[in-house]
Amino acid sequence: MATVGALFQNSVGVKVAIIGAVCVVVGTLCASRQNPSYASLLRRHKELADESLQRADVVKDLLRLILADISRELDIGPDGRSSVYVHDARAFVMCARHSADPTLERPGRGFYPEDQGVIGMAWQSGSRVVTLPDPSTPEYMSDLTGKYGFDTEAAGKLTMTPRSILAIRYPVEPTLPPLGVLVIESSKHRKFSNGAVDDVKNTNSWATLTAFLSTRSGDLPKMSKVAQEGF
């Protein structure tokens, strides 16, 4: 009997040891699944970053198409451009720009202070239409630094010297929080009349633009990204 008891105890001990070993293996496998490696986390982060960049590129391309439609409806030729900005962290970041002239289409500064330029005035009041002096005269620089809050360095780096500017805050509904500003510039003197704001709002593309921007706000550029890219 003692021998049988010993064998039984030994058998139970072996089974317990085997079960314990199996539990350790299963636990290790589960832990490896629940706690992905650092390398796999880095891969996933890169995948998400790539997906985010792809979405941002698609959003920019769609916005450029809408801006092109607005430019056509307002008869903005190669001497003008349309740009849309999102407001973030007390500044404006450009989302997209369209111009028939590639030189005017290229981006300038990475961000624009909310208290500077016609864009800042439109952000405060809802819209603004202005006419500027001839860029070849001292009055032009005087207006930029005096009326519109530019410092001399920023004024000297502008990629366009427009004569006429139209800016509209979006969305225009008073029940919705403002998101940003659409800016349309032209080299033509007095291109925009006082009724130009309503002309923009009456275009088919304005409703498309504001609806798109409102629903895709998560994909619009932010100040943190601008700072990260070193603008």
Image (cartoon, helix red, strand yellow):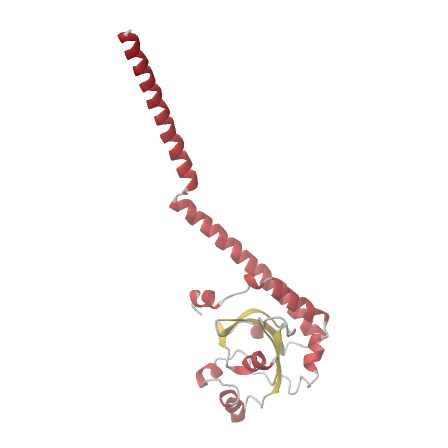
The image quarter containing residue 31 is top left
Q: Position of residue 106 (x, y in %)?
A: 54, 71
The image quarter containing residue 23 is top left
Q: Position of residue 62 (x, y in %)?
A: 63, 63
Residue lying at the far front of the rendered structure: 1
Q: Compared with residue 214, is residue 103 higher up or lower down, i.e. above or below?
A: below
Q: Report whether residue 75 is seen.
A: no
Residue depicted at 55% across the width and 88% down the height? 135
Q: Position of residue 74 (x, y in %)?
A: 70, 77
Q: How many marks?
A: 0
Residue depicted at 56% across the width and 80% down the height? 124
Q: Report whether residue 206 is seen.
A: yes
Residue depicted at 38% across the width and 34% down the height? 28
Name the one closer to the observer, 107 or 121.
Answer: 121
Q: Compared with residue 99, is residue 3 higher up or lower down, i.e. above or below?
A: above
Name the one closer to the observer, 206 or 151.
Answer: 206
